[in-house]
Image: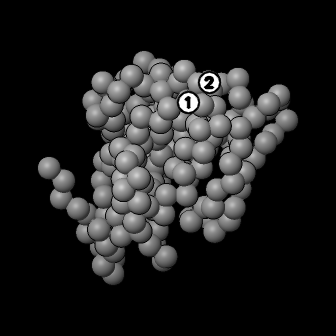
Amino acid sequence: MPGHILNIGSFLNQQIDTCFLMEMGKEVASLYKDSGVTKVLTIESSGIALAVASAAELKVPVLFAKKHRSGNVAGEVYKANIHSYTHGNDYEAVVPASFLCADDKVLLVDDFLASGEALNGLINLVGQAGATVVGAAIAVEKGFQKGGDALREKGMRVESLAIIDKFLDDTVEFRKQF
């Protein structure tokens, strides 16, 4: 789509290929099985499916940050301002403080990684709780936007199931990973 947006709505966002999704979850779990993950954290809504599949394999709970504080989020919250590349807007992600504690070892999961804004917001939320980020698992990373590279340079473990190196007219060039 225009603006270097890859539409994965046919299998991961609007319509979910459940068999493929569960295989993705198994792959994420195999990558992080020895990391001591106690919780998986994502942002509503597109990251939830992969987060659930991954957490099911890891046998841990899923927590998702809401993009706006709603009436059913009571009490103390952790909050972070995040810019959405896809939607071109800013929002305040919130997580109830009672759901994220200092003992948690958190795996961040999302559908896309572009500039890294969403992951940086999630890292901020985890930090407010005094918890530990063990890494991030991403369905599709836009390698040409350097968000993943910046996070890796800071020492964060980022595992992407697919990395796009560039868009060429109507095609996508994926990075070969071995």
Direction from residue 112 to residue 33 in the image, left or right: left
Lower sequence index among marks 1 and 2? 2
Q: Quadrant of residue 18?
A: top left
Name which residue type carries label 2.
Cys
- Tell me what residue is drawn at x 85 percent, y 35 percent: 71
Give percent across and percent down for residue 175: 23, 62
Label 1 element class:
loop
State if disc 2 and disc 1 touch (CB < 8 Å).
yes
Marks 1 and 2, how far apart at CA: 6 Å
How crowded pointer 1 is (Cα within 10 Å; few <14, some 14-19, many 20+) is rated as some
Give percent across and percent down for residue 69: 79, 42
Direction from residue 66 to residue 126 in the image, left or right: left
Q: Which residue is mark 2?
A: 101
Question: On residue 158, which mark appears?
Answer: none
Direction from residue 85 to residue 56 in the image, left or right: left
Q: Which residue is mark 1?
A: 131
- Placement of 9 over or under 146, stated as above or below: above
Visible residue check, residue 22: no
Q: Quadrant of residue 54?
A: top left
- Tell me what residue is drawn at x 39 percent, y 46 percent: 156
Front position in the image: 30 or 123: 123
